[in-house]
Amino acid sequence: MSGGYGVFDDAAREYVIRRPDTPLPWLNYLGQDDLFGLCTNTGGGYTFWRDARLRRLTRYRYNDVPLDSVGRYLYVRDGDRVWSPGWKPARVPLDRYECGHGLGYTRILGAKDRAEVELCFFVDGHKVGGNLVGLQSGPEPVRVEVVLGRSQTGAARRGHRDPGEIVVGASVGSTPAN
């Protein structure tokens, strides 16, 4: 994979991206029945019901290429460092990054210093799901704070609260990896 961004993994039946700084967002189309979502290799994207332009459920600048600036993001705070497993929006260089676009799901793994976080996005029935699949550390336990949220719209960045913004905070203490 010298110099490339990713490869097809026949055994896992997914396209694996190993560099988050792709020239344009590489996305996966997730959906079931009438509910759909787009998830990029950095966690960007949006959710919609039947029509991507007229029935968006989450905010998104339609065809946000090449910015990929809004979506579902997870922030990890480890002491005074804040980073994102999908690289965006924090854009802090990661020690390890991997995104797998498979049939019906996108998984994103990011590692920085002592912590490794894996997320999985999917559509299940009439809900869009996202799981924090794992949080691991090295031989010493680490304590990190994990905050899940949707990125802000322009109005929110100008000081107005975005009525659709979802922010949930949790402290997670990981245990040493076996």
Image (spheres, rainbow, N blue to C red):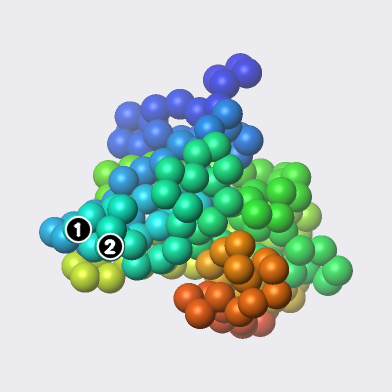
Quick check: marks 2 and 1 in contact, CB under 8 Å? yes
Q: Mark 1 points at which residue?
A: 50
* Label 2 residue SS: loop
Question: What type is the residue that disc 2 sits on?
Answer: Arg
Q: Nearer the viewer, residue 160 or 17?
A: 160
Label 1: how many Cα within 10 Å (few below 14, some 14–19, many 20+): some
- Rendering coords of residue 113 (x, y %): 78, 55
Residue 37 occupies quadrant: bottom left
Rendered image: mark on residue 37? none
Q: Is 2 displayed left or right of 112 in the figure?
A: left
Q: Which of 32 and 15 is in front in this view?
A: 32
* Label 1 residue SS: loop
Query: Label 2 to label 1, Cα distance in Å?
Result: 7 Å
Q: Residue furthest left?
A: 33
Q: Is 77 displayed left or right of 102 in the figure?
A: right
Residue 101 occupies quadrant: top left
Q: Which residue is drawn at 60% across and 39% down?
A: 20
- Rendering coords of residue 100 (x, y %): 44, 42
Viewport quadrant of the C terminus: bottom right
Q: Residue at x 40, y 57 (%)?
A: 46
On the question of residue 14 being in view, the answer is yes
Question: What type is the residue that disc 1 sits on?
Answer: Arg
Viewport quadrant of the N terminus: top right
Q: Which of 110 and 88 is in front in this view?
A: 88
- Rendering coords of residue 91 (x, y %): 71, 49
Q: Which residue is drawn at 69% across and 68% down?
A: 158
Q: Name the residue under label 2.
A: 55
